Amino acid sequence: MTVPEELIKKYKDYENSKGTLIPVLSNQKTNSYLKEIADVCEIQKNLTFHIARHTFATTVTLSNGVPIESVSKMLGHKSIKITQHYAKVIDQKLSEDMNNLKSRMADGDK
């Protein structure tokens, strides 16, 4: 049995007012768990659900060639324009990386 099938089986009798298949944590509860994880892992950055979504969109998907249309659906955006914000972050990072490479190559010529 696959992991998704196991989860569906586990929560087959789960009932809630939101109409979701499995329980969904609030942002507050998720952020609390992320803070615990950061403490255990000695991560100094304040981890939040928002940061996790942003990292998933930029570092995990777009930077690895996942089409923006797919990322948009994964994030539940109604319009691809919202997702394009993440693509601009990638473009800015690419520009910075290329400038750093150019600088390193110029330093190597000396």
Image (spheres, helix red, strand yellow):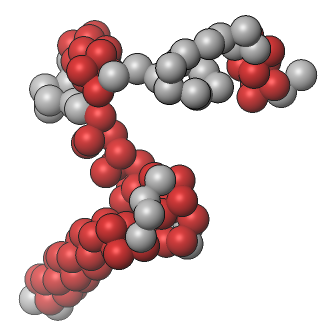
Q: Is residue 6 left or right of residue 63?
A: right
Q: Residue at x 40, y 20 (%)?
A: 25
Question: In the image, is 92 to the left or to the right of 59?
Answer: left
In this orientation, which residue lies closer to the viewer: 75 or 89?
Answer: 75
In the image, 99 versus 63, the foreground residue is 63
Residue 73 picture quarter: bottom right
| Residue 103 pos. (x, y %) | 13, 83
x, y percent for residue 21:
64, 25
Residue at (33, 22) in percent of width and height: 26
Picture coordinates of residue 59, whole percent (x, y): 39, 56
The picture quadrant where one finds residue 12 is: top right
- The answer to which of 51 and 39 lies nearer the viewer is 51
Q: Which residue appears at 33% of the width and 40% of the height?
A: 52
Q: Residue at x 23, y 32 (%)?
A: 48
Q: Is residue 65 above or below residue 91?
A: above
Q: Is residue 52 above or below residue 107?
A: above
Q: Quadrant of the N terminus?
A: top right
Is residue 90 visible in the rendered image? The answer is no
Residue 63 image offset from top left, x and y in percent: 43, 65
Is residue 54 something that shows in the picture? yes
